[in-house]
Image (spheres, rainbow, N blue to C red):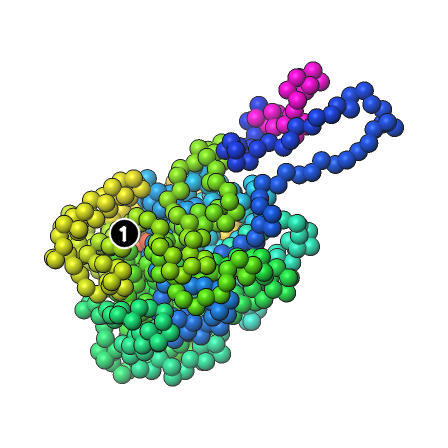
Amino acid sequence: MREFYNLMKINCNSIFLLFVLVSGSNFKIYAQDVLPFPPVPTASVANETLAESTHKRREEPNHLPKDAPNIIIILMDDLGFGTPSTFGGGVNTPTLTKVFKEGIAYNEFHTTSICSPSRAALLTGRNHTHVGNGTIAERAVDWDGYTGIIPKEAATVAEVLKDYGYSTSAFGKWHNTPANQTTVAGPFDYWPVNYGFQHFYGFLAGETSQYEPRLINDFTPVEPPKDEKYHLTTDLADHAIEWMKQHKSYAADKPFLLYFAPGAGHAPHHIFKEWADKYKGKFDDGWDTYREKVFKRQKELGWIPKNAMLTARDKTMASWESIPQSERAFQIRMMEVFAGYVEHADHEVGRVLDALEANGQKDNTIVFFIWGDNGSSAEGQNGSISELLAQNGISSTIQQQLDALDKLGGLDAIGGPLLENNYNAAWAWAGNTPFKHTKLVASHFGGTQNAMVVRWPKMIKPDSTPRSQFHHINDIVPTIYDILNIKAPKVVNGFEQMPIDGVSFKYTFNDAKAKEVSKVQFFDNNGSRGVYKDGWYACTFGPLYPWIPAQKGLAEWDSNKDVWELYNIKEDYTQYNDLAAKNPQKLKELQEVFNEEAKKNKDYPIGAGIWLRIHPEDVIKAPYTSWTFDETTKRMPEFSAPGLGKKSNKVVADVEIKENASGVLYALGGSGGGVTLFMDNGKLVYEYNMLIIERYNVESSTKIPAGKHKIEVLTTIAKPGAPADIVINVDGKEYAKGQVKRTVPVAFTASETFDVGEDLGGPVSIRYYKKAPFKFEGKINSVKVDLL
């Protein structure tokens, strides 16, 4: 080995590299001329004695420019262009305002119009379908652009910067792991810590309760404290602040990347009453008036062009005048809660940035503060206390909402832990002022145009002039690489990398009027699509109206018959004046560009994101039809768990109970919806929480005596969404039976779980809410589940 060492002139680290390569271990392989090997030692000590030797520790190689900045990426959730007071909106945002006054802002910055796709584009610098994220993780299907998996051929910015010497961390919402791969059994390949983040604290799903979140610390499930003062956004800020302090203490010589992505303002809109009450009376005039006031302020602030036109409300969306007086207090309170929720999140972001300043690190930290991963969300439809109704395509009336609300505390319950509330879609439309439409619509800028503020005191002079160059969320990564003067690696971890789709906007940092770099950007979500090139934008709305409950006719949609529109964005900021009829040649040219981009970016079949709305039976699920659980089964995510409330099934529980026992035998879901089997003072109770608005109980007045028993629950459901017949047998004899009039076809929740022996997270049944997690008083030997 010594002769081989001398021949090759390699150091110990390189011998280790040779070993791991031969042994097949996972080792980072970098593009040549990007990350060279450590320098080869030039002197040999083979013949020296220890007494004759001198020792000097060799320096670690540095592949970053001197004084490389810390990087903080803040990504808010479901927040439209017309929400922040910083830029004329009705929600107080002092932190965003402070960062803007110390930096610069972009008023033509775009996202993908939906959560997982925007996050995949942000982290990789590629187009969303190019990296398998054409829709949200929970709606992934097996077409290349829609798998819900970011390929290893598209390394994240965290992976690359980590290998260059950055410390990396992520806090908050992730939403880029396949929904059926989030159990403690893994696989963990697509979790944040295996995408380059050395530490992650947050939630993997698209949403979670702000009071009882389903948290993950790196790979370990974490239960939040049972504390009435607990709120997830505060918890995330606390952890981010702690991590920054520890980084300064332990690794002050290294720059860091911190990705902070709170759940606000995604539903459920959860916030303490005092924050919502700050907005009492501020929205009493309704969404149409709100929109007019915001538009006026946006112009006064110089945030939008003077010639911009205010686009009209879609004819399928309700006017404020059409809302009955009896329902207006409900609709107003929904918006007050949303506003308080968002202001609270802005405050917590402020705490993180204040800690950065207190650490003395503000000056050389670049902050990308992105106000939303898409526009404000219309998924509350007519206003809902149970926002998963929209995801399941289940119709309901406002009266049903109000009736259910009355049983849970009335208007004061909105924003609390018993509800999964989301405001009326028209509030979302107003929150996207001055543009058309909302989240889930990629054709019009209400869904895709989000404010962004950038601050870097050391290198960027504060300037209130908006940057109006057309840019996209996939441009963040190449901008970071440009700042650091590094190239995107050709190979990472042995995987040859696909090209970056984004372009750098560093050129705009100190020149608000810099000529826009040439960029072609395509958009597609749920068949709503468009393409931008050289100031022109062509688009078509597609089949899905996010604000229409249980929309019909999606299966009959033919994308070839869609009507396209054409806009000159540089003269028509808000897509007000459709030029398709006047300039058919330009429209045809852009349609051809879209087709080229769609093919290149694996976007076909057009509309793949709506497949599960038509075929809920194809939703992501476990590959098994039979399971055996016991009391160790905790925190099994719904998308990996048996579909107890969606498919015909048989559950057999082998238990030993005490006299007058109480507690949960098993539960799937949470406060927003689910199925639970529990005992209450010796009586067995089955409850089906149909997304809060309906609850069905099957129980008997007969107590089950102490001792060993076999409890069998038979559920028969003809098809997704159909009624369910429930039969409960104890020791082979019928104990109780009943019917659930309608069932949930897709999912009860995004992040809640299946638990045996207690109900963790939000409790499925209101009957044991104050006793949660309502641990079972007895022994559960096994719970066997078979899908029928």
Instruction: Say which residue appears at 25% left-offset and 52% top-offset.
Output: 530
Between 264 and 463, the residue placed more toward the observer is 463
> Would you identify the image quadrant in which residue 431 lies?
bottom left
Tell me which residue sits at (64%, 61%) in the image: 360
Which residue is label 1 attached to?
534
Magenta-highlighted stretch: main secondary structure? Answer: helix
User: Is 384 contained in the magenta span?
Assistant: no
Q: Is mark 1 on a helix, strand or loop?
A: loop
User: In the depicted view, which residue is nearer to us: 274 or 634?
Assistant: 274
Instruction: Report the label total.
Output: 1
- Asked if 243 appears above or below 785 in the picture, the reply is below
- Which residue is painted at 55% across and 71% down in the image? 228
**x and y percentages locating residue 682 in the rendered image:** 50, 63
The residue located at (52%, 33%) in the rendering is 33
Residue 400 at x, y percent in the picture: 29, 72
Q: List x then y, in percent, for residue 551.
A: 22, 60
Residue 4 part of the magenta-drawn span: yes
Q: Tell whether 605 sits left or right of 388.
A: left
Residue 105 in view of the camera: yes
Residue 593 horizontal/vertical position (percent): 23, 45
Q: In the image, what residue type sits under mark 1?
A: Asp
Residue extending farthest to the right is: 51
14 relative position to 320: left or right: right
Question: What segment carries the magenta color?
Answer: 1-21
Q: Is residue 709 visible?
A: no
- Would residue 476 appear left or right of 171 to someone viewing this image? left
Nearer to us in this view, 491 or 468: 468
**Label 1: how many Cα within 10 Å (few below 14, some 14–19, many 20+):** some
Tell which of 89 and 6 is nearer to you.
6
Check the picture and name the quadrant holding the N terminus: top right
